[in-house]
Amino acid sequence: MSFDADGGLCILLVEDNPGDAKLFDHHLRSSGSGSFPPASVTHVESLTEAAERLMTDTYDIVLLDLGLPDSSGLSTLDRYNDMIAEADRHDPVPVIVLTGLRDDTVAVEAIERGAQDYLVKDNVDENILNRTIRYALERHAQQQELRRQNERLERFASVVSHDLRNPLSVAKGRLEMVTDDHAAVIERNLERMESIIDDVLTLAREGRSVEETEPVDLAVLINNCWENVETASATLLTPIDRPIIADRSRCRQLLENLIRNSVEHGGESTQITLGALETGFYFEDDGEGIPEDMREDIFEAGYTTNRDGTGFGLNIVQEIAEAHGWDLQATAGTDGGARFEFTGVTFAE
């Protein structure tokens, strides 16, 4: 993001300490230069006043003290986030939190709760403040652009899905009128088209970064998935009892795709195992396995060795893993089958 030095910045300073407020105001107003624009600073002393200002005025960034008369600690940030949500702002105002205490744990948690940065007031000078605001605005602009791209992708996927499903439904409805030997071929290809639509829609949605996570018991989840997938006479072992931190819905999609892949390629009576690793978990079967020279190709969109497959299943698995920040590797299973190892996973306490 580039700054317009002539345009200036509108900053809302939420600080109840007069001395700190005066110091921040001085740093901000004396910063006009070619690399950092002059700032217009509005100073309020409480969250209530900040809420009123945010409802009526437009600001580029908020500097928020965590210790205020009507709120303290991280609950101040939570209340600020609630205010922004209630204001129904399409483009939320980025926030930098201010505190008088150095606490790395609080700093990390503040960032996780949506703050762009965390400043200890005694360590702030003009240069540090300018640099922090610049980086915060750049990160916020990147986040908002990513959000808009995701929204456009979602709209595109939904339109494509809708526009393809309608003629597909008509074709399947007319299929019963076809009585010759071509009917089976037509039906198989229509079903494959429907599977491709489902997978493309999933791929468009699952690649987004994960925002909401919770403890997930993989053993319980895969047993639920087992009921939703055609598993023929395959069997399941789950030597894993340590919950992970993840998006439950996406983990379900990941496991269901892996189960389908094993049954399709490992055989109807394959044995599937979901087990624990020191830094994650693995999924393997006892089927034919994956040739070493194909273990990277299998994750490419559209790659398949099954004429009825869509080639998107393992690509979706990879997208979900990357969205969580996990590393994924295909290797040989214990009994020679396919094995997928997920590492860099966060475990629940």
Image (cartoon, helix red, strand yellow):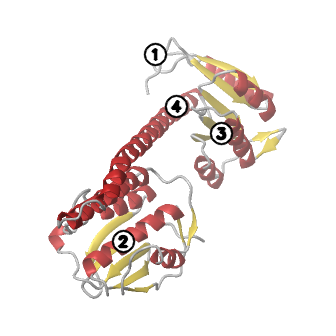
Q: Is 182 on the left-hand or right-hand side of 221?
A: left
Local packing at callout 3 (Cα closer than 10 Å; few below 14, some 14-19, many 20+) is: many
Q: Residue furthest right?
A: 69
Q: Which numbered disc, 2 or 1, marks the residue closer to the eye?
A: 2
Does the rendering let one see residue 158?
yes
| Occupied quadrant, residue 348 | bottom right
Residue 319 is situated, as x and y percent measured from the top left of the image, at 37, 57
Identify which residue, 286 or 63, lies in the foreground.
286
Q: Which residue is mark 2?
A: 258
Query: Residue, x 70% and y 42% (percent of image)?
Result: 82
- Say which amino acid is labelled 3: Val
Does the rendering let one see residue 341?
no
Mark 1 or mark 4, earlier in chain: 1
Query: Residue, x 27% and y 88% (percent of image)?
Result: 335
Local packing at callout 2 (Cα closer than 10 Å; few below 14, some 14-19, many 20+) is: many
- Say which amino acid is labelled 4: Leu
Q: Which residue is mark 3?
A: 97
Mark 2 or mark 1, earlier in chain: 1
Q: Is 120 on the left-hand or right-hand side of 281?
A: right
Residue 159 is situated, as x and y percent measured from the top left of the image, at 40, 42
Q: Which residue is mark 4?
A: 137
Q: Label 1 to label 3, Cα distance in Å?
A: 26 Å
Q: Secondary structure at mark 2?
A: helix
Q: Are marks 4 and 3 in contact (CB under 8 Å)?
A: no
Q: Label 2 to label 1, Cα distance in Å?
A: 54 Å
Residue 17 is situated, as x and y percent measured from the top left of the image, at 79, 32
